[in-house]
Image: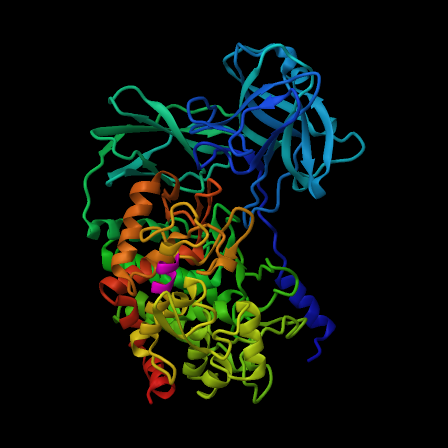
Amino acid sequence: MKLTIIALLLFASSIVYSQHKQDKIIFENSIMDSHYYYSKAEYSSGCWIKNTQGKLPVSGQQYFTPGNSLELQYRSADDGQWKATVLYNEIRGIDSFNEASHLSFWLYVTDSTEKESLPAVNLLLADKKESGSASLVDYLGSFKMNSWVPVKIPLSVFNKDSHLPAGQIKGVQFSNKTPSKKEGHLFIDQVELLSTAKASGTVSVAPQFLSAKGYEQHIDLAWKKESNPAIKYIKVYRATDGKTFRPVAIQSPQVAGYSDFIGSQKGTIRYKLTYVDNNYRETGFSNSIAASTRSMSDEELLDMIQESSFRYYWEGAEPHSGLALENIPGDPSMVATGASGFGIMAIISAVKRGFITRQQAAQRMINITGFLLKADRFHGVFPHFLDGANGRTVPFFGSKDNGGDLVEMSFLVQGLLTARQFFNSVDKNETQVRNSINKLWKETEWDWYRRYPGSDFLYWHWSPDQEWVINHSLIGWNEVMITYFLAIASPTHGVPVSMYYSGWASQSEKAVKYRAGWGQTTAGSAYSNGNSYFGIPLPVGVSNGGPLFFIHYSFLGLNPHLVTDKYTNYFENNRNIAQINLRYCIENPKNHRGYGDDFWGLTASDGPEHYSANEPNVKNDEGKMTPTGALASFPYTPEASMRALRNYYRNYGKYLYGYYGFRDAIDLDRNWCSSIYMGLNQAPVVVMIENYRTKLLWDLFMSAPEVEAARQRTFTP
């Protein structure tokens, strides 16, 4: 198909996306104690620098912004060298930065340190290049020892020949400058790239607390959200004696709450807040609020994790569209269509649990469906990402990713059809929701994504200017069973039932090679597996089952109890995959820290260097653990999932648990915990726990007439 010049121009205008720019913060806080993962400490000969496993120590006692700083303790000598590098943590979606004029950080110099021994500073640039250096002492002027002081070094000092964009700066490096008789001892905090020209504005009002609620190990705080761009942080103060308030945390203004994990602390805890502006000036205190921790049953723990994970899709949603962000923190305007489908199901679960009212949920769905009806679609199919402000395509994965994404669309439609069945009253708002969903459902051209008549496969992507350039046919076993099922179920643009076996469960040479390629094994390459792993049979699955999101994403609405083909029943198959994952983690062949019967669930998540899918085999087990793996498996492994929930919360909650539930992943070997929550991982926790407790989402989705008809045509012998 050829596009006219006019069509190309129209399309080009439809994908204009203005990335949200942010200040580049190289160090704010370390989630983990002991040492900071994104750092490096090294020395030679007569020099020395304090380190733990080659990383800089973290201080929880001395900091400028709570709760910690980086510690530099060193000895400089005539021979040798020491270096301390603080690296920027690349966060998904935060890749467009404000122009910066200077390097800024806060410094605490102990009185045992000779001023002349203060280190040199330089920047680590792209391609591992180093900038020129600056002498720290030249930018301190008159300062007090044992006190936090600001340091600002113009970027021009580091590269006199050309401008240094913030995006090219990958870290900051401190190193020895002159020998010293004494050891130097510094603390460094809030390492940032800032602009002197940035208008900081003023903050004239104090924060306003809304609530404080105690749980077993933490207290949830919520406050009135402010949109003033002059607010850099909300600062949280805690008093355990009712009167002495000490700072314990800072929170981004994007989030209107904080989970204060206090462990076994007993008694009434009081809190106050301040706003911190871009110059680190604080407002007066908010009102005071108090709460206490309490013992909790397993059922209460389930309520707790469902509610906190649901917040991601309610309070954390993109404000214009009401849809789910890809990750938080991240780009605050980039919404993920598949994660939004999961989020819709989490919202329905929240009504069931009483976290919100049915009327509130219906109003949110009016907002969501109204936005979707106006947003970019490609033969009825949404792209992976949309700009929440205007509904335009966001080609986040590159220029080829600028059209319809059939898999993400199927995740979204699974949620929409579930919502259509839930909002079934004659109420005006609920009727509007149903009508909008029906329009979106009927206008989805699943058959277009066959690519050509008679194709055995559906294809993942279509681009309006590059057509089928990605050329990715959908072949199972993986997360896309729901894509084939909904394509078969479509009342207007359906595909033949035969495509379930010719595409999803294909035995063709192409399919066998595809599975063997990504699985790095012939086990399961012909769809059926038939082997046993750790004493558990696996009827269907590549390798020994793959990452656990394979048994979650397609089955948030599609009830695996009711899905049986000529190979297996998928509840039994999914349960076996979860049990294989569990037993692998108990056996722990790579001897990773923490792994066991209460620390398991290998799946896809954020990682120390990149997003990756981990599996229960030695080739694909990196040592990072993802809470959603075990928690979204509650219907399959309720006892083991409950053990994992208790362990993650009670023993690792200080790092892992936050206002939106569990952070994305943790790696105890590397002393690393993800700084983000992900849209694809929070909702499956809410939804699958609800399916375990009441089968709510399964019952709703399966009650759709098109769904039941497709199930009977596809799966009934």
- Quadrant position of residue 127: top right
Q: Quadrant of the N terminus?
A: bottom right
Q: Provide residue 242's location: percent of width, then percent of height.
A: 24, 22
Left or right of residue 576, residue 126 in this image: right
Q: Main secondary structure of the magenta part?
A: helix
Residue 388, visible in the rendered structure: no
Which of the two residues, 223 or 559, is positioned nearer the viewer here? Answer: 559
The magenta stretch spans residue 371:
no
Identify the image quadrant of the C terminus.
bottom left
Is 580 contained in the magenta span? yes
> Residue 166: where, in percent of width, then height?
66, 38
The magenta-colored residue range is 579-584
Relative height, residue 350 to residue 59 (above, below): below
Query: At 44% from the left edge and 24% from the top edge, which residue is drawn?
Result: 282
Residue at the (22%, 65%) spot, across then down:
694
Can residue 646 be seen here? The reply is yes
Q: How is the image coloured?
A: rainbow
Judge whether 646 appears above or below 538 on screen: above
